[in-house]
Image (spheres, rainbow, N blue to C red):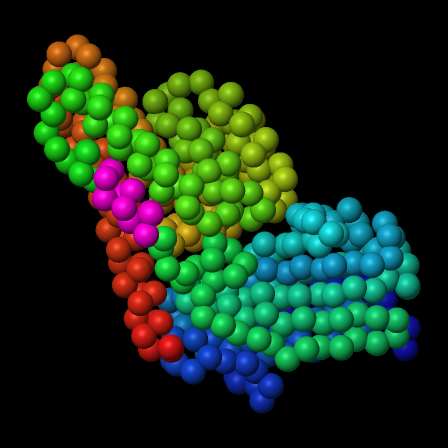
């Protein structure tokens, strides 16, 4: 039968299969070998995910590495993100995904990565002229596709957030002390964020900084145009198409609800922190620190202290969640060597 190269990958949460890969331990799921079925203008790829923890369902990331030129480019890649060397990635695409083509001579590799908080599994299919070869899935502890979850938090992040919390929870005695504490806290926070994992194909700060600034604009009722444009520019070469489209709508009609909806479009979890929660907490911190500066400059140290306390609460929450995440990582490492 002639092979036609359109991919559709379906997630089936069903009973266990004989050729599923699994790490020992009840907290881990299994991923089956990919089953391939030819169809009209398509190859259909099915994969089963089983033993799924009810409170930690894995996300899926699909990718293709097409060979054969523009005729094999999946209709300009649709919502996929083009990476280096022709790899195209669909983040959290859901149960189905299609690889469109215009030639029966296309070849390449289809891969699916399933990942939750503590495990990642990868299954691949090599597509060649007249045949497909599905490899046995491979699983490992730790993140791989989105945010490198379950890797230990770098020591520099803990050290930096310790500084942030210390600076923002010390009662200042002068306007100069307020300014100094804020400056030291922000430098430490910047150092911490420099060690966060990448978001899709871009550094964490490239994506996070303009989105957090946009959230601050919305909370203040300030003009959002510049920061909305900065977000779109940052996401242009990083984010899946659905995310880019959602932020285009935010730029056209800015609102907190619109930003909430855009941030719900599959942003990764980083060191156990939901991206949207981190945006909200750092934005609240930024607003409070700006108010503390203004109050201190006007000689109102009591108001400045109160605003530093609010900012410190946000920073302490982030630090506490990092602590909790790290304890979870240690439990997994101790249980599975």
x and y, in percent, of residue 171 in the image? 10, 29
> What residue is rendered at 26% in x and 33% in y?
185
Q: Which residues are magenta?
A: 155-164
Horizontal arrangement in the rendering, residue 122 relative to residue 166 (left or right): right
Q: 288 above or below 317?
A: above
> What residue is rendered at 18% in x and 17% in y?
176
Residue 230 covered by magenta stretch: no
The residue lying toward the viewer, choosing from 101 and 237, is 237
> What residue is rendered at 85% in x and 66% in y?
4
x and y, in percent, of residue 239 in the image? 58, 44
Q: 238 above or below 320?
A: above
Residue 159 covered by magenta stretch: yes
Q: 10 above or below 266?
A: below
Most prominent secondary structure in the magenta stretch?
helix
x and y, in percent, of residue 90 in the image? 63, 54
Horizontal arrangement in the rendering, residue 11 relative to residue 174 (left or right): right
- Taking the view exactly as shown, the residue that stands out farthest to the bottom is 18
x and y, in percent, of residue 152 in the image? 37, 59
The answer, for residue 242, to whether it is visible in the render is no
The answer, for residue 320, to whether it is visible in the render is yes
Q: Quadrant of the N terminus?
A: bottom right
Q: Quadrant of the C terminus?
A: bottom left
């Amino acid at each position: 039968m002639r092979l036609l190269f359109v991919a559709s990958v379906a997630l089936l949460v069903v009973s266990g299969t004989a050729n599923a890969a699994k790490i020992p331990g009840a907290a881990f799921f299994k991923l089956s070998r990919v089953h391939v079925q030819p169809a009209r203008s398509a190859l259909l790829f099915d994969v089963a995910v089983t033993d799924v923890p009810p409170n930690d369902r894995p996300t899926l990331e699909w990718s293709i590495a097409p060979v054969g030129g523009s005729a094999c480019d999946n209709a300009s890649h649709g919502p996929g993100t083009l990476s280096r060397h022709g790899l195209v990635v669909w983040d959290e695409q859901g149960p189905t995904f299609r690889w469109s083509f215009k030639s029966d001579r296309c070849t390449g590799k289809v891969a699916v990565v399933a990942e939750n908080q503590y495990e990642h599994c990868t299954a691949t299919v090599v597509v060649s002229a007249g045949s497909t070869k599905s490899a046995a899935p491979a699983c490992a502890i730790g993140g791989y596709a989105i945010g490198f979850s379950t890797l230990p938090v770098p020591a520099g992040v803990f050290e930096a957030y310790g500084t942030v919390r210390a600076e923002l929870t010390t009662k200042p005695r002068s306007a100069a002390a307020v300014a100094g504490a804020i400056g030291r806290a922000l430098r430490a926070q910047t150092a911490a964020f420099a060690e966060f994992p990448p978001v899709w194909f871009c550094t964490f700060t490239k994506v996070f900084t303009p989105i957090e600034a946009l959230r601050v604009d919305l909370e203040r009722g300030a003009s959002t145009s510049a920061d909305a444009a900065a977000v779109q520019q940052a996401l242009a070469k990083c984010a899946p198409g659905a995310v880019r489209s959602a932020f285009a709508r935010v730029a056209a009609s800015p609102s907190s609800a619109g930003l909430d909806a855009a941030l719900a479009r599959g942003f990764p979890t980083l060191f156990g922190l939901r991206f949207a929660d981190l945006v909200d907490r750092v934005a609240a911190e930024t607003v409070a620190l700006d108010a503390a500066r203004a109050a201190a400059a006007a000689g109102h140290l009591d108001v400045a202290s109160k605003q530093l306390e609010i900012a410190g609460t946000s920073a302490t929450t982030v630090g506490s969640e990092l602590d909790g995440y790290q304890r979870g990582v240690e439990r997994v490492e101790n249980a599975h060597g």
